[in-house]
Structures are given as C-alpha cells and as structure tokens.
Image (cartoon, rainbow, N blue to C red):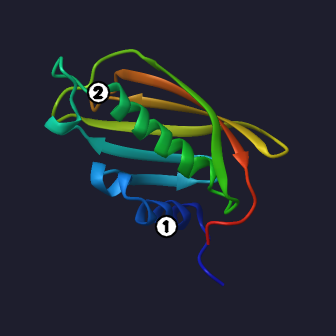
C-alpha cells in the first residue's frame, strides 16, 4: 500500500506539475485539510511596477489550496476562488501561503489561504471552494 500521508500527497502533486517546480514552490508542512508552502519572488515574477505580479501571488495561494483540499487522497479541483491583495511583495522576498480547511459538506469544501511576507505582514487573503471529482492521487 502506498504512503498516503498528506505530505506524500502534496509531494506527489508538486512532482507531477510543471508550474510548482518552475516557480520554486517549497512544501513546508502538510496535514489533513492543511498546507503551508513558500516561494521566493524572482525578477521574472514581477509586474511593470517592479512588485510581485498578482498572478504569482494567486498561483502560490491556489497551489496551497490544492494541496490542502487533496490531502485526503480524494481528487479535488477548484470550483471557485477569489483573492484580496493587501500589500506588495518585492523581488527576493520569500512568501508563505498557509491553507486551512474551513468546512466540508458532501463533495464541496471551503478553504482560507493567508499569504504573508517573510516579515509576517499580510500580502493577500484567498478563499477557495473545492469539489471532489472522484478518483485518488495515489
């Protein structure tokens, strides 16, 4: 029987993606309904204002959401997501996204993801709604 811990599931998903490895996403922690990821902002992740592109912040939060909602080895996808940007990220800064399950009802789940700068300030707040689609990760 394969190792199906939340950490192993997150590592498997990261290894299967082209995006996470390309962005340098690191898994710091994973648990049932939970994940914490980090990503260092590179110059190619900045917008025309020289600050973190909102799409990169969204991508980090969305990835943390994905690992949290798939942590029970039941394949899930996003059916909705939204984000509020609160502060800028700067080149070289390490951002941390922490996803927490808020509720599960049938095949749907609600997740909150906080993205923080390395000094602890709030960068963004993300909310995701997941839908279990059948099948497993491992």
Residue 108 position by quadrant: top right
Assign the N terminus to one quadrant of the image. Answer: bottom right
Residue 133 position by quadrant: bottom right
Which sits earlier in the primary sequence, circle 1 or circle 2? 1
Q: Nearer the viewer, residue 121 or 93?
A: 93
Image position, residue 92 (x, y; %): 16, 36
Q: Which residue is mark 2?
A: 53
Dot 1 and dot 2 residues touching (CB under 8 Å): no
As drawn, is 125 to the left or to the right of 46? right
Q: Nearer the viewer, residue 92 or 131?
A: 131
As drawn, is 92 to the left or to the right of 103? left
**Measured along the vertical axis of the image, is residue 121 above or below residue 27?**
above
Q: What residue is rendered at 62% in x and 54% in y?
A: 70
Image position, residue 36 (x, y; %): 46, 45
Q: What residue is rendered at 34% in x and 34% in y?
A: 56
Image position, residue 110 (x, y; %): 69, 34
Q: Which residue is mark 1?
A: 12
How far apart marks 1 and 2 lie (CA) works out to 27 Å
Image position, residue 129 (x, y; %): 67, 35
**SS class of the residue under badge 2?**
loop
Residue closest to the far right:
106
Q: What residue is rendered at 46% in x and 53% in y?
A: 29
**SS class of the residue under badge 1?**
helix
Q: Residue 30 has which mark?
A: none
Other residues around mark 1 within 10 Å, as few (<14) / some (14–19) / many (≥20): some
Other residues around mark 2 within 10 Å, as few (<14) / some (14–19) / many (≥20): some
Q: What residue is rendered at 18% in x and 20% in y?
A: 48
């Amino acid at each position: 029987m394969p190792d199906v811990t939340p950490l192993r599931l997150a590592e498997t998903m990261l290894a299967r993606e082209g995006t996470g490895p390309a962005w340098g996403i690191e898994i710091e922690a994973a648990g049932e309904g939970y994940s914490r990821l980090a990503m260092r902002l590179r110059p190619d992740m900045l917008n025309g204002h020289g600050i973190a592109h909102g799409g990169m912040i969204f991508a980090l939060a969305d990835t943390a959401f994905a690992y949290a909602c798939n942590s029970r080895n039941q394949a899930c996808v996003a059916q909705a997501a939204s984000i509020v940007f609160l502060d800028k990220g700067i080149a070289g800064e390490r951002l941390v996204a922490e996803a927490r399950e808020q509720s599960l009802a049938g095949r749907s789940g609600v997740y909150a993801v906080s993205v923080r700068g390395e000094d602890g300030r709030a960068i963004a707040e993300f909310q995701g709604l997941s839908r279990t689609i059948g099948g497993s990760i491992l």
